[in-house]
Amino acid sequence: MKEKVLSEHFSIDNFFKLDVYLKHNGYQAVKKALTELNPEKILKEAKAANLRGRGGAGFPAGVKWGFVPQNGDKPKYMCVNADEGEPGTIKDRYIMTHNPHLLLEGIIISSYCVGINTAYIYIRGEYENIALRLETAIDEAFQKGFLGKDILGSGFDLDITIHRGAGAYICGEETALLESLEGKRGNPRLKPPFPASIGLFQCPTVINNVETLANIPSIILKGAEWFCALGLPNDGGTRIFGVSGMVKNPGIYELPVGTNLKDLIFKYAGGMKEGKKLKAVIPGGMSSPILKADEIDITMDSDTLMKADSMIGSGAVIVLDEDTSILDVLTIITKFYSHESCGQCTPCRIGNSWIKKIVTRISRGEGKDGDIDNIARLASNMVGKTLCPLGDAAAMPILSIVKKFRDELETSIK
Amino acid sequence: MMKIYIDDREVHVEKGMTVFKAAENAGIEIPHLCYHPAFPPEGTCRMCLVEIEGLPKLELACSTQVKDGMKVHTKSEKVVEARKGVLEFLLAEHPMDCPICDQAGDCKLQDYYEEYGLFENNFSESKERREKKIRLGKHLIHDNERCVLCRRCVRFLREVVGTGEMGVFERGIATEVNILDGMPIDNNYSGNLAQLCPVGAITDTDFRFQTRSWFLEKGEAICPLCSRGCNIFIEHHRGFSRFDLPKRVYRISARENAEINSYWICDIGRYGYYSLDENRAEKIIANNNISIKNYEAVLAFFTEKIKRLLYKKKTSRITLLLNTFLTNEELFLLKKIFQDDLGIKNIFFIDPPAGESDAILLTSDRTPNKKGAEELGFEITPFELGNLADETEVLIIFGNYIAEIFSLSDIQAYFDRIKDTFLFTPHRSELDSKVGIMFPTAMTPEKGGSLTNVDGKIQKFSPVLEAPGDGKAEWKILAELGTKLDVNFKYYKKFLSPEEIFRQMQKEIPFFEK
């Protein structure tokens, strides 16, 4: 049995309640961090753990905290990105549903490390029940003195506020999230300045994904070395892979970073449903470029997938079988991104809509010669030219599909 | 100071400057739609992408700050391809109704297509249909199909005017700008939106479908409708040989002046141009059986009336009504002739009543040169009809604002007692029949000279238009009067242009020296 960091206690009844959580070593990490360690030591530990961001970009969490200026007179903020919207992604909802106090511990420790006294959890609007559960967990933590003023007599104060989103994918982009949190239209901001220096309410801000923060307590308790050893040398720990699509046992699997994708599908998720043949895999949420069946003998970590021209993203593995029409996949992808583009910058606003129009026409059986070339050309015109990563997130999977399944797409035209 | 290289040219820049600004200073134009120097960079149109050596992606010129030794390419193949790509996206959803668009000829999209585009149309899908005639406010109509979503309008209303009537609605391809529910744009700066719009999305109801921009000539002028002295363009039409146009001036637009009006003007100034073409006084009117047909005769008659009192040493029987639309030069000549040479004390001012001021540009004075008059040493005594001394024999009036303030019957009662009344005015009014002689004059854009704004800034200007009919600039009439009066005629001989009068003012009045 592989060691689990996040989902070990998921099956324990009422684990989300503080009294049950406390029976399983709960809040020991907070206690250790606030009473035995100082912020410098925590930062050192987080950096040594090689914990890479689990939201999609894979940026090392400790390095991110280190960017926050420590000598300013402005307040600093922590924003927890719980706007889990990447299609296929279900990891954060499991963490927040079954282990909300683990997340809270992560928030408390990282806030203490960076010197933050106010944290916001920006949670996806549809996660209403989870938001209520988090609210209860926060209340419990307040009552027991893990939140609020002078936590565990350390002199450190922290307040956590939950903010529910209103259903826009783009608000998962960190600067759009900040805009939305400030009560504005959720449009991404121009970077630089980066949120670490000018973020929420123009103040230094740390934005971390739920899963990223939930790893912090274990790193504090068991050490960076232990955490690092779970995964790969520069990409430590485990990840919760959410496997969906045409596998026998879809669901979440917490496995070490660097687990082979083939094993994930065939060993852990039970292989293909109804004995069908594997056609392709989208390895890290819908915005990651597709892998063909013969490309899945690959380890699941940021660097390896990047070398394979894809990305690990949110670790959401979408498995497609031989019966899946690639044109349908393309249609779903283009519809999604043209619907979710914030509309702010030209290439994303018009490019996504244009591609969607072509793909929809092809799926109506009205494709023409040159359509596929045009799709590829338009997608290329988006890559690297948009204000935020959504343009790339839309164009990269489209380009990969056109490249790898061109023949099948061409047959839809003839 | 730092050095960077733009298109292999060495450019000296200051820390914190953007690549866009550095290029602009070096005379290199970078295409842009959302960028406007009045606002922080928006970075959404993606037209200003440039290549910076050592960076993997193209970067925005509008927001990227210069670094010492930076090598920027604004016309490399990669950059031109990216521009083409962005332009193709914009044009794919653009209605291409240039033949009926007011912006045509003055449109960034057209310019950039000519420079970077000229590509085949690969867009065979149906364009989004959107509302093409949204009434945004009194002066503005918005066409959402033409809109490129630069959001200059939204930002202007939020950041400059502070009223925030407009916002962005919907998302993705459905994104549109519009006014918020029940918030039409009726602020005094609304007209700037049509000028600020880089395409023909926001059009001015006043200008809509009136003419084509390429027929218009832009004359540099100063707005005379308050004491701010905003810099403007008077956009006028030279006309066609085969038919007459209904007017000369088709619109007034803001002309940049960082020290005075930035990039904006108010609606009072922008829509004040009707007075240039409407109700103008063009011909001399002589009442009371005076038979006078031309300027020379008027001048001779006028001079004779004044001389008569001068010889009788009874110049106290002359009363002068001035206004602060008059230029520094004109007021200077008036002071020299009537105050210094003739010793007249009955000098009053009659201006349009003061109005509301705001914290943006508009001042409460509704004339451009009150400060100039004060600096020339005039005491701005507001005129009452009772000020007219019983002994007044000659009344000289500049402008017809008297008719706006006092009732005609009251004026008539006072005028009946006066032998000779001379009215110098650019506009017709009921006053014309109450005076002895009405002589048409030029309006501010029809003459040269200078004005002193509320902050004491002296701004010179040249005529943009000709005065209609017999109309003449007051400075010219006054300079000639000066030469004919036999008091100090040599002094006035040299005043053949406002520039010469200004030089004399500089010699005599320290304020104008600077």
Image (cartoon, coloured by chain):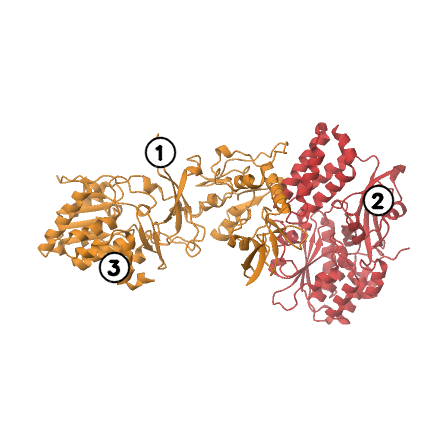
Check disc 3: other Cα within 10 Å, few if <14, some if 14-19, many if 20+: some
In the rendered view, tell whether residue B222 sits above or below residue B144.
below
Q: Secondary structure at mark 3?
A: loop
Where residue A234 sits in the image (x, y, percent)? 80, 59
Look at label 2 and name its amino acid.
Glu
In the rendered view, tell whether residue B514 sits above or below residue B98.
below
Question: Which of the two residues, B22 or B93, is positioned nearer the viewer here?
Answer: B22
Does the image show residue B46?
yes
Look at label 1 and name its amino acid.
Leu
Q: Which residue is mark 1?
A: B245
Residue B6 image-quadrant placement: bottom right
Q: Give the residue at x 72% y 59%.
A: A138
Left or right: residue A37 versus residue B503 is right
Q: Secondary structure at mark 1?
A: loop
In the drawing, what numbered circle is on residue B378? 3
Question: Which of the two residues, A397 or A182, is positioned nearer the viewer here?
Answer: A397
Where residue A305 sits in the image (x, y, percent)? 80, 50
Does the image show residue B147?
no
Left or right: residue A336 versus residue A184 is right
Where residue A100 sits in the image (x, y, percent)? 77, 56
Q: Which residue is mark 2?
A: A295
